[in-house]
Amino acid sequence: MTAIVRQATGSHTNDLDAYWLPFTPNRAFKRAPRLIAGAKGMHYLTPDGRKVLDGLAGLWCSNAGHNRDPIVAAISRQAAELDYSPAFHFAHPKAFELASRVAALAPGDLNRVFFCNSGSEAIDTALKIALAYHHVRGEGTRTRLIGRERGYHGVGFGGISVGGIVNNRKFFGTLLAGVDHLPATYSREQQAFTKGEPEWGAHLADELERIVALHGASTIAAVIVEPMAGSTGVLPAPKGYLERLRAICDRHGIVLIFDEVITGFGRLGHAFAAERYGVVPDLLCFAKGVTCGAVPMGGVIAREGLYDAFMQGPEHAIELFHGYTYSAHPLACAAGLAALDLYRDENLFERAKRLESKFADAAMTLKGLPNVLDIRAVGVAAGIDLAPRAGAPGERGYEAMDRAFYDEDLVIRITGDTLAIAPPLIVSEGEIGEIFEKVARVIRAVA
Ligand SMILES: Cc1ncc(COP(=O)(O)O)c(C=O)c1O
């Protein structure tokens, strides 16, 4: 194994043994590592000099592509100017600037921004803010959290508790107490090969009424959903679903949280999916695209009234006992400001909207290929369900991802036997065609 790595990296000090890769089959990877050594724009470079097309915007984060000059320059300037200042009791100017810029992109009165360092931390932060919000208002009995089956909200204990993907939950004990789940919004019988939001499924939001009837509204703090469930295979909310959730939350005083870690910063043709769907949540989680993936960062945008509820008591006293050493890290803020400039100057959110139908058409060309059970496309994202091989779930998907990288010079994402495609929003129409031609060859190869 070591020999392979030495060959692949050209280094005699490099060894694959020590690194325990996240969400990766380590033994298979270390037998045949997929190494990436450089990147520019739409492409990666491998150590052996291959140019690989990025069909996943990093990991749903590099929305303006890779190694963009203004972001690189902003990070290096910032590193020389202010590497770090304490996040508690002190702050640096770019933290305020980025908070204002992010708030300006969010709809309605979502205008108070709490920073953290990842999507998972954003989810924990939002769940804790929701609980504390009820507490400071004298409704401390509201402690239940409601997630959704097939939801992905990162890997913290909060996120896996409200999340709905079995393998992310079943190994990790009893999780948070007092959590319930809405049903997933996907039905292949009703929705197969839909472009955009499916017509069927808005009624599934009414399951929240059933949960309220079961537990009592006075025990429920928050509901959290992804407007488009990404990690589970690109499941956009059915038409009308989010409006119905909003109405039920309003009726019962429940905090509505949107997890926009994937949908934020243009993936669905808007700064946030909340805008696309015309629904303003009480808390909105973001991460990934805020810095174009260049420096880790996440955050939660709160409605003004929710923030105001905390602003009471003596002025020298902390209002929310929560935060991270690296909240609003100077490098992340610099990268974030440069990324938001790029998104604005290159009209990338509008570009995503313009590309949406071309992208969906290109994705649907895969219909009819061997083992393709369903294709979903929304914004610049597509999910393709392949039939699992008998007795070996996930094997076909894994082989597809591996062949895409080695045989087609393309990076795609897999969840089990579902492929996900979500390139940077700078993708050209020609590259969209190229991506799906490559995926078509891969699907035939793994038949
Ligand atoms: C919807 C959603 N929420 C949360 C997360 C977790 O983000 P992170 O991996 O940065 O912790 C992800 C990551 O893919 C995500 O897709």
Image (cartoon, rainbow, N blue to C red):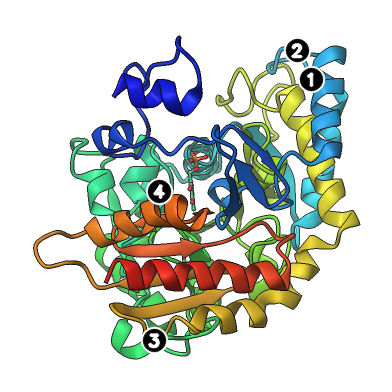
Residue at image mark 1: 91
**Disc nearer the start of the sequence (2/3):** 2
Within the image, what quadrant is residue 80 found in? Answer: top right
Residue kind at label 3, given as amino acid type: Gln
* Res. 168 image quadrant: top left
Mark 1 near mark 2, Cβ–Cβ under 8 Å?
yes
Alpha carbon separation for disc pair 4 and 2: 36 Å
x, y percentage for residue 427?
70, 63
Tell me whether the residue at label 1 lies in contact with that at label 4, contact meaning CB atoms closer than 8 angstroms: no
Question: Which mark is drawn over residue 191?
Answer: 3
Judge depth for marks 1 and 4 and give the one in front. Answer: 1
Q: Is mark 3 within 8 Å of ligand 1?
A: no
Query: Is label 2 in a helix, a strand or a loop?
Result: loop
What residue sits right under mark 4 in the picture? 142
Name above or below for residue 275 compared with residue 322: below
Q: Nearer the viewer, residue 21 or 250?
A: 21
